[in-house]
Image: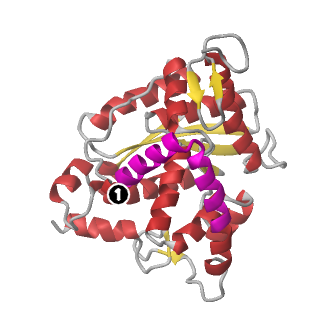
């Protein structure tokens, strides 16, 4: 089949749009959507200058999403002195898995001449995820511990690196899965937080939450297109799945979403369009309320939290008590 935009052979079919794309037009399509999201979310403020540049920290895991994001953002702003990139990799302590992906991170960062920082759970929390997964003191999926530790490490080191933005490689599938999970669980407050975290000017978000605002420039791009982009560009990517990955509910949602998308192309886009509208309504109800519990600081580590102690410190107590 020929490319819809030219006479070259197509490498993919985007059923949701009805288009066939060759390699060159696939690259253009993915890159255009990432750059559109950067503009749409006002990621680069008008007052950024070479003398006072923006620092963007990218969470680089070595997987396809973070590698593609890093590659496109670097290519886009390589010659722009208003943006400085730093790659930040979190090593959880998973034997064999993260070591291999770290190699991919280092290869990409070295090749693109991007400063690269590595943070380990061992140094930061005195834990290894292999041990946490084996002991499991709270009878939870390993991802439940790891996600909390990872978010804490990313946020703290983004702060230490004086970041203006923290970029993560969430793609369209990731976002649509999270949307469905929140709706199926009836988690209206989390829906409202999505509005605060994903929409609106970055400066307002940072002032409101006193946190480094996060950006997801890949969130308009389906996962398969990210994977194909990485493969055709021959980017250094670690494709193995984490051996402790066991988010059963997310896996069920993923299967459901893939089935719906196959039968009804465009489902993911429709979910996100409706979810963001719903999120704005939920934010009116649950956000900015005078009775809303204020965000304070963890009495142990100082991290932002609405509780006396943050979730990370509570989990570490349980892990260390074993």
Residue farthest to the right, as pictured: 46
Horizontally, residue 44 falls left or right of residue 188, namely right
Location of the C terminus by quadrant is bottom left
Residue 214 seen from this side: no
Identify the element where label 1 is drawn.
helix
User: How crowded is the residue under tag 1: few (<14 C-alpha within 10 Å), some, or many (20+)?
Assistant: few
Asked if residue 68 lies left or right of residue 63, the reply is right
Location of mark 1 (residue):
249
Q: Is residue 4 above or below residue 247?
A: above
In this view of the protein, which residue sits in the foreground, 121 or 9?
9
* Side (left or right) of 42 relative to 10: right
**Of the pair 272 and 216, the residue shown nearer to us:** 272
Identity of the residue drawn at 79% across and 41% down: 51
Does residue 24 appear in this view?
A: yes
Q: Residue 277: where, in percent of width, then height?
A: 68, 64
Q: Residue at image x 62%, y 67%?
A: 210
In the picture as drawn, the residue positioned furthest to the front comes out as 263
User: What is the magenta range?
Assistant: 250-278
Q: Quadrant of the N terminus?
A: top right
| Magenta stretch encompasses residue 120 | no
**Residue 171 locus on image (x, y percent):** 54, 43
Classified by dominant secondary structure, the portion drawn in magenta counts as: helix
Q: Position of residue 257 (x, y in %)?
A: 46, 49
Query: Quarter of the image holding residue 152?
Result: bottom left
In which quarter of the view is residue 249 placed? bottom left
Q: Is 320 placed above or below 299 here?
A: above
Q: What residue do we see at 67% from left, 38% from top? A: 34
Per the image, is 262 magenta? yes
Decide: is 216 above or below 101: below
């Amino acid at each position: 089949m020929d490319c819809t935009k030219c006479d070259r052979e197509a490498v993919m079919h985007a059923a949701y749009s009805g288009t066939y794309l060759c390699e060159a037009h696939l690259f253009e399509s993915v890159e255009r959507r990432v750059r559109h999201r950067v503009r749409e979310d006002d990621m680069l403020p008008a007052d950024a200058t070479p003398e006072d540049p923006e620092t963007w920290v990218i969470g680089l895991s070595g997987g396809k999403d973070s590698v593609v994001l890093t590659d496109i953002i670097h290519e886009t702003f390589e010659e722009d002195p208003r943006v400085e990139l730093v790659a930040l990799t979190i090593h959880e302590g998973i034997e064999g898995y993260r070591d291999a992906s770290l190699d991919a991170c280092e290869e990409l960062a070295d090749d693109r001449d991007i400063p690269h920082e590595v943070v380990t759970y061992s140094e930061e929390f005195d834990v290894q995820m292999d041990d946490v997964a084996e002991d499991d003191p709270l009878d939870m999926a390993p991802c439940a511990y790891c996600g909390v530790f990872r978010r804490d490490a990313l946020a703290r080191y983004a702060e230490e690196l004086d970041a203006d933005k923290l970029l993560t490689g969430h793609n369209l599938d990731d976002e649509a899965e999270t949307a469905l999970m929140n709706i199926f669980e009836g988690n209206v407050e989390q829906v409202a937080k999505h509005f605060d975290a994903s929409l609106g000017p970055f400066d307002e978000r940072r002032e409101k939450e006193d946190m480094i605002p996060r950006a997801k420039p890949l969130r308009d791009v389906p996962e398969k297109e990210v994977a194909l982009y990485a493969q055709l560009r021959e980017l250094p990517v670690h494709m193995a799945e984490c051996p402790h990955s066991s988010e059963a509910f997310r896996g069920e949602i993923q299967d459901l979403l893939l089935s719906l998308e196959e039968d009804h192309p465009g489902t993911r886009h429709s979910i996100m369009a409706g979810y963001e509208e719903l999120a704005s309504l939920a934010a009116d109800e649950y956000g900015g309320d005078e009775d809303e519990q204020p965000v304070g600081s963890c009495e142990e580590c100082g991290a932002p939290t609405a509780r006396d102690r943050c979730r990370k410190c509570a989990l570490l107590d349980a892990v260390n008590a074993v």
